[in-house]
Each structure stands twice: as structure tokens, then as C-alpha cells.
Amino acid sequence: MTVASAAAPAPNGTQPKPSRVKQVRHPNGSPWIAFGFAAPLVAYLLAFYVYPLIRSIDLSIHDYNVRAFVQGNAEFVGLEKYIDVLTSPLFPKALWNTVLFVGISIIFQYAIGLALAVFFRNTFRLSGILRALFLVPWLLPLIVSASTWSWMMNSDSGIINSFLGAFGIGQINWITSPDTALTAVIIANIWLGIPFNLVILYSGLQNIPGEVYEAASLDGANGWTTFWRVTFPLLRPVSAITILLGLVYTLKVVDIVWIMTKGGPANSSLTLAVWSYREAFGTGQPAFSPAAAIGNLLIIIALVFGLFYVRLQRREEH
Amino acid sequence: MATFAEPAGTRRPPKGRGKGRDKPVKKRSTWWKTALGVFFTALMLFPVYWIFNVSLTQRSDLRKNPPNIFPVDPTFEGYEAVFDQQLPALGTSLLVGLGCVVLTVVIAAPAAYAISLLRMKGGKTLNFILLVAQMIPAVVMAMGFYAIYVRLGLLNSIWGLILADSTIAVPFGVLLFAAFMSGIPRELIQAAKMDGASAWRTFISVVMPISRNSALTVSLFAFLWAWSDFVFASTLNRNGDMIPITLSIYNYIGNNTTQWNAIMATAMVASIPAAILLVFAQKYVAAGVTAGAVKD
């Protein structure tokens, strides 16, 4: 979890000023050579990040329909599309669904991931292999996991309903009922996120020195107290990073929801990202301008959490 | 030499036996942990087993309630359908994945070298931009790309898809390479300089060979993300002659709501890269997750 800049200060600090003059003359020290190596990346970022972003802002402040899209003569409408989106009756619904989707997913992913990380901290027979197998859900293509969950949650012949049926629980229309569709995609998404949380928290646990635990056990602390008084506080920085990253990445999830429910039924599982996707690509009538407006609002939300993350990570390095 | 500054997480091999904590006294009582661990893993991997099970189920048994827990009377008709219909899509995905790997490494490695070892001005700013870039939702990028590709005629082309898919991996690649390269001892670079090696020569003959583990991690992720991508494929390439496997499965589900054995057989085949990675490169996968702290 380190960023390149961490190692730079040390050698710089020891060098007296005159050597910097020498550096400029030396081929390896020349700023132009360094820039030459970075130039492809800078060009790439301009062409494939900045330009698409500018286009998406451009889409959101014009009134684009399909024809205007090809000809490029859309009418300028300023912030009208944003106002349309924010005042749409769908907006509070999509926002609330996003909060639920992200919030509940993160809480469970983190809690389960942490419990498993603690469980796997002590090595036992097969622990390495089992921990590796936990990566599987994360490595599978999303279309695979999403369609599997759809089939497992099928009302009539899904395994989940037949399992619950064995306990006398009647048929639940997981995906087809507006009451449970959001729950269904959240369950699938929690499953998908556990490996990520497990791996990061596990590596965080590995960095806690063993002596700390020994000291705790000498003081007579049991497993439960040790966890709450020692492990959990020491893991706080890693936890914060895991959760913030999880937030940023869960906010932008489209595929799992789209493949399972398409945001339906009756918008019951519509999140902001899915809404944006649906407006632009999900119907026969692409409405790129509102879609771009929703997407850009989403960027702003993601960036707020993202900047928290960057600040935390910077602090970690010092 | 290659292991001296690996990203966090690879430092400890998966089986961290022989640590001071595992006293022999404890060893005796760990069998229940293994049992519990196997149980958790089985629970977690049940959906994966279910793909396998359904892929072998007879079509007439698919709607059976309760479903067969084991593939009794297995059929391979699902897999036959895969080989009849899905081979081109698998080939397309392979091509897109490999294209992304090449593009990502070619762009990311030199840039990371500039940031971490050549002390490029603005390197920190670039790092920050890359972190932020990873947070932009794919759906926004897809719209931007769509608007651009409509004009350039790049819609439904392999190249367009490779370019778009690579944006998932390039920022991650630079950050991971840079994190590793900043741990390479300066003396090594200085020595190369003394011998009269140019910056380029140093990069090719000294830095890259040392960084091959990072290169492997970056390549793995670039491939896997491109292989698994759905958002770009379903927006930029949906009417193409050559569609990737993710989109092909999606279309297949839309057209054949009854043939879930064939869908699951395709899912099995589409998961092969993940399985290979897990078996042969688990160490690098874990390293990538922790070093770049990335997801989906």
C-alpha cells in the first residue's frame, strides 16, 4: 500500500545543492529524459481519460439526441440536465438505493472479511490453500457470478429457495419482486467483495508484530479482549483504507446489478450508476445528456470519498 | 535479487509456518480450525460449485424442484453448445486481453521508471492524478468513449475495445510499478550510470529485469480485467462482428432463458483464466490486491 513518492526524500535530502547542477547536465538526471519516459503515459491520460471526461461533461450540458450525437450540433442547455436529474422523482429513490447498496455491502464485506482475516491469521493445516480459494469469487468475470446468483435465486427452481423451503420458508421471488430485488443484488455484491477485504485486512494483520499479542496474552487477555483492545485499534488505518476504497468502488458498480435485475423491478434496485447506464445504453432510446449528468454527479460523490482515501494514505506513509 | 522489495503481502509466503507464535502445544488443537476453514471455504465457493453442477445438468432436470445437488446423470450438451457457438467469442476475449497487457505494460513501466527513479518533476502530482483516475466510474468513461468512437468510427472494433479496457489497468499498473521500482537500491542505478549506460539502457537492462515480478502482476490484472469487462464491451462493442465472451454470455442469457446448462457451461469456460491465475500465480494476485489496493 505504498506509493512511489515514499522513497524519494531520503537520497534528495543528503545531497548538497551543487550536485543538483551536475544532475541537470548528466544524461540520467535530465528532467527532459524523465519526461520522455513519462510522455506516453501523459499522452495516454490526455487522450483516454481527460478527453472522454471532457466529452462526458460536454454531453451533460448539451441536449444530445441520437442525430445530434452523430452530427455534433446539439443545443447548449447549461445546467438544465443536472436540474432535471436532481428534481426527477427517480433521484431520491436512486440515491437512497445507492446508499443502501453501498452501505450494507461495505458493512458486511468488511465484517466478514475481518472475521475471516483473523481466523486465517493463525496458520493451520491447509490454511494457505483455503485462503487462496477465497480469492475465486473476486477473480471470476462478473457476468459469471451475476448470472450464477440469478439462477441460484430463481423463484421456482433456484437452490436458495429450495434450501429455505426445507426450513418451511415459502417461495421468495428474490429478483422478480420489488421488495427483495435490492437485497438480492446486495447479497451477491457482498459475496463478491469479501475476498478483497480479506486479502487487505489479512496483510494488515501480518504487519502487527507478534510481540504485541504475546504481551497481551501475558497480561491475561483472552481472544475476544485481545481483538477489541489490540488487533482492532492497531488495524484502524488499514480498515479505513479498505472501507474507503470499497466505498469508491462500490459506488460505481454497474454490471452486477444490471445483469441481475437491470435496476428493476419498478426501479427497486436502481442505483445512480445503473440509472446512468440505463439512460445511455439500456433502452432503445439513448438519452446521453441526462446519463452524463448522473454520471458526473457520481464522479463528484466518488471524489469526495476518494480524497479522504488519498489523505489517509498520505498520512500512513509518514 | 528479484524479491528484495516486493509489494506488501508477498513478503510472507502463503504458508507462514515456523513463526514463533505456533507453539507445538497449539498444533494439536488446530484440526477443528481446518474443519471450520474447509466449511467456510465450501460455503463461499458454493456458487462456483453450482456453476459446475448446473453446467452438467440435463435440460429436462433444470426446472426440477428441488434441484439435483449432484450432477447425477451428467450431460455434456452444455459444453457442446459452448464449443459450437462460443469459440470465436473466447478468441476475441483472448485477443483483447493480450492487447491490454501489452498496451498497459508499455505505457506504465516507463512512466513508473520516470516517477520513481528518474525523479521526474511533477511525479507526485502524476501519482495523485492516477489515484483519482481509478475512481472515475466506468459508465462515465464508456459514455465519453462512445461519443468519441461514434465520430472516429471505432465503435464495434477490437482496437477500440482494447483501448477502452486498458484504461482500467494503466493507472493501477503505473502505481504498482512505481511502488516496486522506488525500492530498487540507488547504487544499482548509479553503477549502471558509471558504466556509461543511458537512461534507456538502464531501464531495459537493469530496471525491467529486476521488476519482472511486478510486470507479471500488472499483466495478470490487465488481462483479467479486460477478460472480465462487461461495461465497455456492452457499450462500445455491442453490435460488433467479434464480441468478447462476457457480452456473448449476456446475449445468450437474453436469447435462451431455458438453456441454463449451456449458460453455466460457458461460464465455466469463461472462468478458466481465473482458475489458471489462481493455481499458478496466487502470490502475484495477493500482491496486486494489497499493493495497489484495487478492486473490480
Image (tube, rainbow, N blue to C red):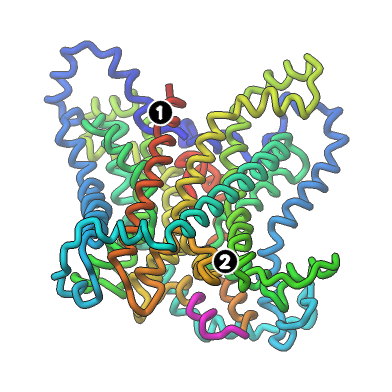
Quadrant of res A117: top right
Seen in the image, is B10 located left or right of residue A14?
right
Residue drawn at x 28%, y 30% as measured from the top left: B192
Q: Residue A258: horizontal and vertical position, in percent? A: 49, 67
Residue A310 shows up from this direction = yes
Quarter of the image holding residue B79? bottom right
Residue B41 % position (x, y): 72, 53
Q: As rendered, which of B275 and A76 lies closer to the eye?
A: A76
Residue that numbered label 2 is attached to: A146
Instruction: Please give the label number shown on residue A314.
Output: 1
Residue drawn at x 71%, y 70% is A172
Name the spot of residue A317 as percent of width and height, x first: 43, 25
Which residue is at 35% across, 81% downward?
Answer: B241
Q: Secondary structure at mark 1?
A: helix
Picture quarter with the C terminus of chain A = top left
Give the letter of the chain under mark 2.
A
Residue type, mark 1 in image: Arg
What span is in magenta?
B249-258
